[in-house]
């Protein structure tokens, strides 16, 4: 249990029973060129399946079996492996083998099509090595940390929240002598420990008298450990850098160029796909918490006064599973409602945020996430950064519980503002008013003579500062008020303090006619963790054949399957071999990835091996092929086969992979084949 | 000049005049699904072009102008920018803006199709963060270094070879008082400095009395600076790691799993596309020497006894520009010969190496590298690692000279052997003989009693070591010989030394009948630097319009162009606007990337802006569109236009981008349009 806890969202610990959603989630397909795959698999062919779509319940009983089966499959078929395993492996670092790598590449291509191409985003590709100054500005150097404790004697280290949780779980094993209130308190701490700050962790570790595991020694106080990998840039030894913990900063620091590239018009979105690095204290649970991972992030820049979205209409009737902040405080019940309703009720803050949530949902459904296995959880007030306006995580259900896979945050203007301040660059946008407007400004009358008398050396910067208050009415009035009340205002400039008195400046409110205004755009950020999505897809699409638990199948949509078609000669006969070459070549030319299995294995064994890596279609060459130039074509989930002429094979497979025809169309078009049994 | 020197190959300094290749380089297209683009541009429309394909000469006079024009374009149109430029930038780190990022993504997709799909490679995706042990085994911790010197007083640092070269160049500015021999010597040092080892650099810096630039202070002796970025993995502070300096190690450490994945058969190839990191001492010259860059590497594992290639026939008549090691010693003349001839003459060591060189050439031609601007340069004996069998760099000509962009190395079994030794893992392959063979082995008779008398505590490891000598005949005989000659052999095991005497072991040569043998596969490694290739493509495809040097054009092949079609409304009329939406949507659905320019600019200005980022086709919507649902379609290089019905636009553009029809076909199919002048 402790293993699961840290990586699933805290809310799942309060056990919100996932409500059965009887309505099927309809969503309009806004991209004609691909649709969610529909297979005609009858469910009675499957067992050990995580989701039963008919009642949308997770098969909790099978959870451990499914995870173990999938992990064995992933290892045997080289989907994913611990990096450097010949050297004993390195915690939190994983390599993708050929099938995993192909799924990842397909996922990235589809993401690019779904978001970058369809939404006219500006994709960038920025570096990982980042100078300290950039990450100081963003707040990562100061705050991107987890809390550690050490065994006072052995110096072994632990994540403070993990060790607290483990202790509470031990206490909860025997509740016979506890009051109801005590049990509730312990459960509350267990649910919240992951969000505790340094002080809260310290207090709880003392209160519950937590000691080092195994040794029972005293623990140090919790202290922060920054999760960024640190390095030195260049040979001077004076230029500290970090590996980026997210890709977003590359977009923010390039905002000016992107704004220019987009014709200085808002809104526009930038996107980036790339690696991020987090030096986790104790990485665990496979692909879900790792030290190096691929993200796909979008930063959609908008005018804060207008967060409507021109294509909102296209998704407003799409339904989603929403777990609001309010609901988490109360019943933890999931609401099924349309994005249109959610925005109308102010459940989701604005159209643009909702639009991206809907597009994320469409993307996830397309790549194989089951509607019942996807929900959006709103951040609670105490989880959100102070500047954030609204945040919704797309959480995907797997054997680890609900796992955050895509964040959707309205980050207001925080990022641009901190970088503008720190870099002293202009990262603002300008909006021309439809017609000139009168806007409130500060009328500032400066008396340089009076300033000079008292602060001779600093007349010019003081004068500059005061004059520029014109566009910051609030600050200007605050200064005037202080002078009026206290007789003077202490102005701090470049580390020096100057007292400003009434004779030096007079400030009043005025109006000015303006043609437009300058402002920091707000940013709405969908942020995808691709490794977590890939793992979730695999789990949700893994099953075993009825009556044969050894035969694992990955029911991956053709669009992300690592190999689209297997080519299987029935025997190693010299008469059959030439067809392998011809067909293989023809499919490659149609850009269909194939894998030939010309081992001496029986055909059933060959099918089983391709089922395991999710190959949707199998082409078998037999002696009839030699006679009449036809082959059998088999679909993975139904295991049904048709007999098809070689001349029509490539075009048919191309259409099946592009989803312009369905397998049931094929069953109607070509003769069913029932020759070889599996 | 110093700026250029370090990043171009040394051989280019000995000024091999690039021979005019009058034969046009024919190469067979082995992939039907894409062919090199052919445009019908007449050359008199272009000026400031790097290559004149008619005589294959670089326009040396325009070199600086071209580079400056392109750099300005890249900056203005946000192809590439220095990273973190709002913070003053960071040397050696570059971000790709939207057009650059799209070119890179297209290049990667094509690479994957050309190599991974077509050659049935096993693609993997491994992590960058690498534990020290792995890079110690590979030799990088000890040897992946450049040499630095410091100003004794100011401590400013320099790359030792750069400072030596700069000094020699200064000396060469006035040769009036030098003898012919002296001038030759200086030129020789200039050409070789980049390859000098620590001792040679030290001697030369003393000999030529090199001082620190600007200050004239004395310099320290040269010392190595390791080029890997170092970091710590996890919070212990005890686990040193590095960012990978190449992607290859991820493949070597996964060899066992890959061998298994490929059915334990040789040959097979693994591939990887990913970032690598090198902490250059003094990065410069834009994308050509950077600290973080994307590589695409192939490791093709073969049986050392058989380096033939099954598809060699398909490329044997392809011609290439070869600069052999011998030729570099003599005339530096480039030989134009077929890969078949080159292997036959033993110029290229083996078929597999030659096959990959040919495939690389096809790839580079497809993405826009001019035949005359590509050569293969063989490494000279003193450049090659001791274990390497043969190495050929694909060098591309740009304003920086001939730049190494793709390495092709036969690395023998070095990498697998060092990792097998260091990790104590089995990284070998097994080959079954066609029929059983008698092979030489060592017959080892061990006397544990005698060992026990002298080395009681270590009997078991000593016995194990001696017994295992069976399969290492050479080592076994060496030990026996030493015992016979010196009376004992000093065996080092786990840091302890044991003397082994004649009473402990008897070794003799024997024969054994075997069904197969175990061996380390050799590896042939094509290694692509994508950033260098992208920069080279841009330079070789940049030109300005005749009589208008302000109008830069990037003549990128459609297959890698960042945007395939621009959509240009002639005016902002409300009657025209709806067509922009319809056409934009139709093209997106055909997966054709577009960019709309609905600014008020004149149409000529709009074309110029799309020419600059290499958009091959322009769709203009005018008032005739409203009348008859036709638009004009313009090709970038010819600037010719046709009038085409909207209903046929998407399919026509799709075919143009897939290169299944050519622009000259289009000119014959649709009416030529000469309405709008540019």
Image: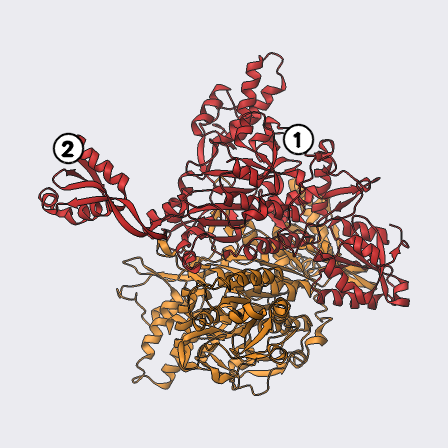
Chain colours: A red, B orange
One can see residue A474 in this view = yes
Identify which residue, B652 or B59, lies in the foreground: B652
Q: Which residue lies furthest to the front in this view?
A: B627
- Residue A261 point in image, percent of width and height: 43, 60
- Residue A42 point in image, percent of width and height: 80, 43
Q: Is mark 1 on a helix, strand or loop?
A: loop
Tell whether A609 sits left or right of B578.
right
Q: What element carries label 2?
A: loop
Identify which residue, B596 or A666, lies in the foreground: B596
- Residue A339 point in image, percent of width and height: 57, 41
Mark 2 — on which chain does it sit?
A: A
Q: Which mark is residue A19?
A: 1
Q: Which image quarter: residue A658?
A: bottom right
Report, in whole angstroms, how far the alpha carbon at label 1 lies from the one at label 2: 64 Å
> Residue shown at 60%/61% (left/top)?
B586
Q: Which image quarter: residue B147?
A: bottom left
Q: Which mark is residue A487?
A: 2
Q: Quadrant of the C terminus of chain B?
A: bottom left
Labels 1 and 2 touching (C-beta < 8 A)? no
- Residue A444 point in image, percent of width and height: 19, 44
Q: In which quarter of the image is the N terminus of chain B?
A: bottom left
Q: Residue furthest bottom?
A: B22
Q: How many marks?
A: 2
Local crowd size for mark 1, using a 10 Å CA cut-off: few (<14), some (14–19), many (≥20): some
Up-down relation of residue B465 to residue A153 (above or below) = below
Q: Residue B317 carries which label?
A: none
Are discs 1 and 2 both within one chain?
A: yes
Identify which residue, A595 or B443, lies in the foreground: A595
Mark 1 — on which chain does it sit?
A: A
């Amino acid at each position: 249990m402790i293993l699961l806890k840290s990586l699933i969202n805290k809310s799942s610990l309060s056990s919100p029973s996932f409500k059965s959603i009887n309505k099927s989630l309809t969503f309009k397909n806004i991209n004609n060129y691909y649709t969610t795959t529909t297979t005609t698999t009858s469910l009675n062919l499957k067992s050990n399946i995580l989701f039963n779509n008919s009642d949308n319940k997770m098969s909790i009983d099978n959870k451990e079996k499914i995870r173990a089966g999938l992990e064995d499959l992933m290892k045997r078929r080289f989907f994913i492996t611990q990096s450097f395993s010949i050297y004993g492996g390195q915690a939190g670092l994983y390599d993708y083998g050929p099938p995993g790598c192909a799924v990842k590449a397909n996922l990235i291509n589809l993401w690019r099509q779904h978001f970058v191409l369809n939404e006219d985003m500006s994709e960038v590709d920025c570096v990982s090595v980042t100078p300290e100054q950039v990450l100081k500005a963003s707040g990562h150097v100061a705050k991107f940390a987890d809390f550690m404790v050490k065994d006072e004697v052995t110096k072994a280290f632990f994540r403070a929240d993990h060790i607290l949780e483990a202790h509470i779980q031990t206490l909860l094993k025997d509740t016979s002598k506890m009051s109801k209130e005590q049990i509730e308190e312990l459960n509350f701490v267990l649910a919240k420990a992951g969000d505790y700050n340094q002080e809260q962790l310290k207090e709880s570790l003392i209160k519950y008298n937590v000691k080092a595991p195994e040794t029972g020694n005293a623990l140090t106080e919790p202290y922060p450990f920054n999760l960024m990998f640190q390095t030195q840039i260049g040979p001077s030894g004076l230029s500290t850098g970090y590996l980026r913990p997210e890709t977003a900063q590359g977009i923010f620091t390039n905002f000016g160029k992107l704004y220019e590239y987009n014709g200085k018009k808002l809104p526009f979105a930038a996107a980036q796909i790339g690696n991020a690095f987090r030096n986790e204290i104790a990485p665990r649970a496979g692909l879900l918490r790792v030290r190096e991972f691929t993200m796909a992030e979008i930063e959609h820049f908008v005018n804060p006064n207008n967060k409507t979205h021109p294509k909102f209409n296209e998704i407003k009737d799409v339904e989603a599973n929403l777990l609001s902040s309010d609901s988490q405080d109360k019943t933890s019940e999931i609401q099924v409602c349309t994005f249109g309703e959610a925005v109308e009720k102010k459940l989701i803050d604005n159209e643009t945020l909702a639009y991206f949530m809907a597009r994320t949902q469409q993307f996830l459904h397309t790549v194989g996430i089951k509607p019942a296995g996807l929900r959006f959880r709103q951040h609670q007030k105490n989880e959100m950064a102070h500047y954030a306006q609204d945040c919704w995580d797309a959480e995907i259900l797997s054997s680890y519980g609900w796992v955050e896979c895509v964040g959707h945050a309205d980050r207001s203007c925080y990022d641009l503002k901190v970088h503008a301040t720190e870099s002293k660059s202009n990262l603002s946008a300008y909006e021309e008013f439809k017609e000139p407007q009168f806007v409130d400004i500060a009328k500032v009358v400066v008396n340089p003579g009076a300033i000079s008398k008292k602060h001779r050396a600093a007349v010019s910067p003081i004068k500059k500062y005061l004059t520029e208050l014109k566009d910051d009415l609030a600050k200007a009035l605050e200064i005037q008020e202080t002078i009026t009340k206290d007789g003077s205002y202490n102005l701090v400039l470049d580390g020096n303090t100057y007292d400003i008195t009434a004779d030096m400046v007079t400030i009043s409110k005025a109006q000015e006619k303006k043609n437009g205004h300058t402002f920091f755009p707000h940013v709405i950020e969908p942020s995808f963790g691709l490794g977590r999505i890939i793992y979730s897809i695999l789990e949700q699409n893994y099953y075993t054949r009825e009556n044969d638990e050894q035969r694992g199948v990955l029911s991956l949509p053709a669009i992300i399957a690592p190999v689209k078609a297997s080519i299987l000669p029935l025997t190693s006969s010299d008469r059959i071999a030439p067809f392998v070459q011809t067909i293989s070549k023809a499919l490659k030319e149609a850009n269909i990835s194939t894998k030939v299995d010309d081992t001496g294995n029986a055909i059933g064994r060959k099918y089983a091996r391709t089922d395991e890596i999710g190959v949707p279609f199998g082409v078998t060459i037999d002696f009839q092929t030699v006679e009449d130039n036809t082959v059998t074509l088999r679909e993975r989930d139904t295991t049904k086969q048709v007999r098809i002429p070689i001349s029509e094979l490539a075009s048919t497979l191309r259409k099946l992979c592009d989803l312009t025809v369905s397998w049931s169309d094929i069953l109607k078009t070509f003769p069913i084949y029932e020759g070889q049994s599996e």
